[in-house]
Structures are given as structure tokens and as C-alpha cells.
Amino acid sequence: MNNLSITEYKDIRVLTTQQLAENYRTSTDTITKNFNRNKERYQEGKHYICLEGEELRSFRASGQIDLSPYVNKLYLWTEKGAFLHAKSLNTDKAWEVYDHLVDTYFRAKKPLTAIEQLQLTQQALLEVNEKIDDVADELQSFKKDMPLLAIECDRITTAVRSKGVKCLGGKDSNAYQDKSLRGRVYSDIHGQLKREFGVSSYKAIKRSQCDYAVEIINNYRLPLALEEEIESLNAQMCLA
């Protein structure tokens, strides 16, 4: 059995009646009689393949087995067909051989051709490249969703200070010198950022939102009451 030659039909491994009889230690007549007695249990295409006419001529031309030119009908048995024959014989030897056939013949992997090996390699490379692209996209997305880095925090802090100085009328203004008023202006700018991004601190803003945060700061407008208070305080400096 170890030297059993491979017989295939349309990429399906099969056994001829002769091969089946030799391995099960019985005769071809017994195999045929068991089949005829239980023919209703066998389904063509599932348990066996019957070759005649042009199909038989093509199979004979493949040279897989030495087939007599006088044979006009050939039965090929699938794994499930081999099982039914073992069941019909019901001998220890038949069951032993069937188990061995399943492990070493019907389900044994065929050696890959050079083209098949190349196709598998190319497919594996494509899958690896796709995974690398996916990881790169995820990493890029992760970086965008990260909290601000120190340099980006400095950008926002600088923008807030610059806007605050401008709103207060410059560093030499009375309003700027008033620490309480100055603190309220900065606090209001920070409050607008928190409301806009739904965060408790501007440091929780995402990296991808940094440019938008600076834009909001640059477009910031003082509340009317705060604006009037600054103008009033700075006007006193002018009068003095």
C-alpha cells in the first residue's frame, strides 16, 4: 500500500476497482458484487465516477494507469466510496486499510508545482503589504488622535497670549497692567476653546485639531461687557 500510485480525475483522488480490491485483500469480483447488491446506497459523483466514451478515452490518454483497450467502462472510487466498500466487507483488514488510505492517500497534500509555489508566495507578499498598509494607516490615525505635544501646546499658549495682549490694548495699557482683568480675558479665551472641543483643558485637544484651535484663538472676540470695561480703563490712561 505504501507504493500505491496516485490516480486522479479532475483533481479528485480516486482508486480503481483493481486498486481497491488489492488493498482490501479481496477480489475485483467481490467489489463489483457488493456494489451491485447495494447500488441504491451509492451516488455517482459522490461515491464513484463512471467513465465511458470520450471521458474514458481522455482518461486512458492521461497514462495514469495501464488500462486495457478492451475496457469500455471504468469505475473510479472516491474516499466516500471506499468507505462504503469497507463497510460492505466489514473485515478488520478492510477497516485498517481504509483508515490508512484516508490519512496517506485521499487527504495527503499534493506537491506544489513551481507556478503554484510562486502564486502562493506572491499572495503571501500581497497579504503582508496589505497588513503593513493597515498598520501604517492605524498609526497615522493614532498620531492624529494623540493629545498635543509640548511644541503644539506652546503654539496655543503663544497664540492665547498674543490675542490677549491685543484685546487688552497692548502691554503698556492700563487693562493689561490690571492682573484681574488680564486673567479674565485669558480665562475667557481658554473657555471658548474648552467649549469648542468639549475638553476640560486645552492640553486635551487632539493633535489633528491644533491648527483649528489656533484659528479659533486668532478669530476670538471679546464679550461686549469685557470689551467695554477694557475700553473704559484704557480711556482713563489717555485722559491722564
Image (cartoon, rainbow, N blue to C red):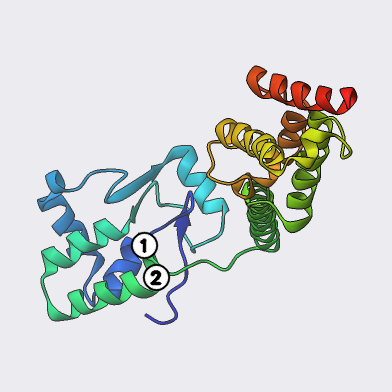
Q: Position of residue 218 (x, y in %)?
A: 79, 29
Residue at 12 percent of width and 63 percent of height: 88
148 and 240: which is toward the camera: 240
Q: Amino acid at mark 1?
A: Leu
Mark drawn on residue 105: 2
Residue 14 image-quadrant placement: bottom left
Q: Is residue 46 left or right of residue 139?
A: left
Q: Circle 1: is it few (<14), some (14-19), or many (20+) Cα within 10 Å?
A: many
Instruction: Please tell me whether residue 46 is drawn above or below residue 113 in the rendered image.
Output: above
| Disc with the residue nearer the chain's start (2 vs 1) | 1
The label nearer to you, 2 versus 1, is 2
Q: Position of residue 225 (x, y in %)?
A: 64, 20
Q: Is residue 226 left or right of residue 164?
A: left
- From the image, which quarter does the C terminus lie in? top right
Residue at 75 percent of width and 21 percent of height: 232
Helix, strand or loop under label 2: helix
Q: Is residue 1 left or right of residue 145?
A: left
Say if mark 2 contacts mark 1, CB within 8 Å: yes
Instruction: Please tell me whether residue 221 is drawn above or below residue 154 in the rendered image.
Output: above
